Amino acid sequence: MKRALLAVALALMLLVAGCNTTDQGGDSTTVETTGEPTDEMTTAQTTAEQTDTQTTTSDGEDEEDDEQEQQEEPCEYRSEESDLVQVQGACLGFDANQVYLNVMEMAGVELDQGPSVRSLSPEQTNPYTFDQFGFSNESFQAVMGIAPNGTPDVYVAGYASPQTGPDGSVEVNVVMRYINASSGEGRPQGPEEAEITLAHEFLHAIQFYEGSQDRLAANLTSEGVNLGDVETSLVEGSAVYFESEYQEQYMDRDAASRDVSAWANSSPFSMYQLGPYVMGERYTKFRVNSTSEFQTLYDNPPISMEQIMHNHMPDEERPLNLSVERGQDSVWNHYSTSTRGELFLRSSLRAGVSGPRAADGAAGWGADRVMVFQNQSYGDAYKYGYAWTIRFDNASEQDEFSGIFQDWLESRGPLTDGVYQMDEDHTYRMVEISDETVVVLAGHERFTTQTVATGNASHVTVTMTDSDQTSSVQSDDDDEERLVAASIAPRAAV
């Protein structure tokens, strides 16, 4: 069965200090989908994976009545019966069918089918709420500082969704939002902004028709890590690459690549959300010579975000060996284990240090594993603890990270009872396992203060006890147990 991947063109409305420009509640600043980036604005498209069959009605608008009314709106550009692309709704202000033909030409494909496009005016567009994108203040991401300051709104400029019939045929629906052909200022998308957005979405439509995402998924090897971010980076990186080249080829504008420097100094939340698009575009340009080659990238994809962020080939800088396990005597329940990757590490460091230092601290990433634990014995609600084991390429890289992370810890709050504490659910301690490997303990104070981490560079055991463990760190090197006092190794028990 074809994987249903909802491709969304969006810009997150993120908080910028001192700004409160949204009229939908919360402190936030619009991050536009098109145009030149500034210090306060970053361009973005994102992809949200969906497990259920998608339709174009996710906005909740009443389609039939609105479409009939909109179709009567005077507009120079209306779909002809012979067009591959059929547009209904608000006037886009340009020939959508020609945009599709242009994108097909860029992709080097000839298709006899095209997507349907539904165009919504600003008045007909229901805003997305932030929780629709799966963010939770209780998540490991939020605990590590990758969270918006306040409750941002989400500005979705458009999205493409596939529907697969019983015979395997694919139909693609594109929804364009906030369309206003007479004005491109502010939230409404004027013709130029909407054309760039639609070029991006039409590349997604071609990916659906060509089975590109299935092709990519089939070639993502079992040796890969944090493959969700890798897949998003390649799927969306291709579309961002296309929208950039489209402007130069068909709009008489300079190819507007995403600003890596602005992204590298953005907020932790913006860095993590926009990383696959900014770095995905750059990696796509590294691997292919023209837009017509974009699918060749899916046949030999990278296996980690590290490779994408540093422009490495799939056989270069491969993840190091690392395994983790829960100790037999643990008093907390082990819920899940996953790999977060270098983008997550860099974004979390950004919550406490500058952009350049976050990059330096994450650059030596070799592997990581996050273990999520739960305990309900301290009240009605679950309490969470996180053991994040990170292995670096060598001792020098680990040492650099540890120094930077010490500053990160101090940014979280004061050292209290052996842990750095914001409140009882946000406490932190780092355990040094070897000269390459550390364990970051985060979450509820009983977890961070009562957990023991033992092991060596490539294997770590995490055990939750019922007694304080902050005064020393137990580890083993070449299977030899040793006890390191906090006063001797300050970074080992902070």
Image (cartoon, grey):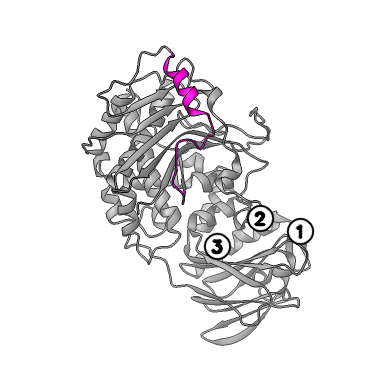
Q: Earlier in the sequence, mark 2 or mark 1?
A: 2
Contact, mark 2 vs mark 1 (Cβ under 8 Å): no
Which residue, given by chain and number where applicable, does mark 2 sit on?
Answer: 138
Most frequent secondary structure within the magenta stretch: loop
Quarter assignment of residue 155: top right
The residue stretch that appears in magenta: 50-73
Is 388 displayed left or right of 114 in the figure? right
SS category of the residue bearing label 3: helix
Please provide percent x and percent y for residue 91. Answer: 42, 19
Please provide percent x and percent y for residue 147. Answer: 62, 48
SS category of the residue bearing label 2: loop
| On screen, residue 3 above or below 382 | above
| Mark 1 surroundings: few (<14), some (14-19) or many (≥20) residues within 10 A | some
Quarter holding the N terminus? Answer: bottom left
SS category of the residue bearing label 1: loop
248 or 410, nearer to the observer: 248
